[in-house]
Amino acid sequence: MRNLDRMSCALPTDLADRLLAWYDRHGRTLPWRAPPGRQANPYHVWLSEVMLQQTTVAAVGPYFRAFLDRWPTVAALAAAPLDEVLASWAGLGYYARARNLHRCAQVVTEHHGGRFPEDEEALRDLPGVGDYTAAAISAIAFGRRAVVMDGNIERVMARLFAVSDPLPGAKPRLKALAGSLTPDLRPGDYAQAAMDLGATVCTPKKPACVLCPWRDACAGCRAGVAEGLPAKQPKAERPIRQGIAFWTVRNDGAVLLRRRPDEGLLGGMMEIPSTAWRGQPWTLPEAVAAAPAQAAWRDLPGLVEHGFTHFRLRLTVVAGQARSPELARGLWCPLDRLGEQALPTLMRKVVRHALAKAY
Ligand code: SF4
């Protein structure tokens, strides 16, 4: 391969050995990891990898420990009510992952005798397990050779081989390059080592090349282009959607909640009822027609803003006391029990906004 020619004469096995030696000394200690050279618990690996999709290591730590305290085995998680899993997941975002997590635990328990399959193909058949997670579980939990690609490893590969093609188009090429380095021995440690190198040394800004075990082989570093890699296609501006959220109270102070449909964004999570979210602003008569109860609504000052992957949302919050609470569409929740509900981050923002502005 042309890029391999541009590297120094280091052999792939040499590079893998150097990275593993670095990992043995400098790898991160994380709650779901086994020490270098030891096999990790597949349940721990799977749980952490699902949590880590789109979420940082620092944010995942407390959730991972709380899940293990509550559901120490995959069978225990499978037997848990979905609502409890969603409530424990609240704050991690991307709630379809929590629903898939629960479904996956049930499939592993019912169809695989409580043991995760070892090879990538069988793992990919499990709910919520894609290419990355399947490769990570197969390599890390079972010591099978698998090419694990996450954002950190893509960055390291783009720099090591000075690949200037932009992402996402360059992904297959970066995976092939990563595959050329993945060793037969200790593939799980190798994958974690590459992730750690990207997270702690080959960081997005100002990579610490002087600390890198691959420095003398790194084409990007040698050419002085490392920090600008990987190149990325410019992102399209995310459109803005707007909606009205209804902070509806009963005369005893209880607040009206509603469960979102199972399918779609924030599926199955609880919410402060709101209008649909759309491009054009809502007029007051339109919003009143979509309200979950009859009330004299008043605007609360300010907006609640939240970013989703494909759009940004601006919610105006209106508050009112329900005239006929028994006719309201939703569930009444005492104010001091809101914290027990599976409210996603957006809805927690709405609650905070209402508590600050409505009383
Ligand atoms: Fe990244 Fe620098 Fe190491 Fe190259 S030498 S892989 S740019 S940290």
Image (cartoon, rainbow, N blue to C red):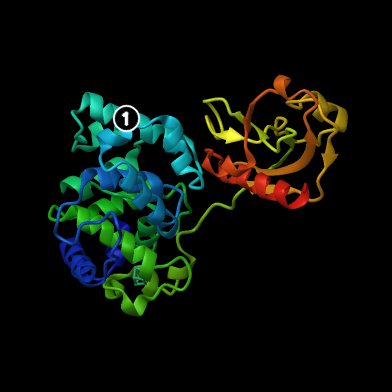
Q: Residue furthest bottom?
A: 210
Q: Residue at x 20, y 34 (%)?
A: 117
Amino acid type assigned to the residue bearing label 1 in the image: Ala
Q: Secondary structure at mark 1?
A: helix
**Left or right of 237, for residue 317:** right
Q: Residue at x 71, y 21 (%)?
A: 326
- Hey, which quadrant is residue 134 in on the image? top left
- Of residues 278 and 177, which is closer to you in this image? 278
Dot 1 beta carbon under 8 Å from ligand 1: no
Q: Residue furthest top?
A: 327
User: Dot 1 corresponds to which residue?
Assistant: 79
- Of residues 170 and 139, which is closer to you in this image? 139
Ligand 1 is located in which of the four quadrants? bottom left
- Of residues 154 and 293, which is closer to you in this image? 293
Q: Residue at x 30, y 57 (%)?
A: 31
On screen, residue 208 above or below 170: below
On screen, residue 106 above or below 150: above
Give coordinates of residue 148: x percent, y percent: 29, 49
**Left or right of 94, for residue 30:** left
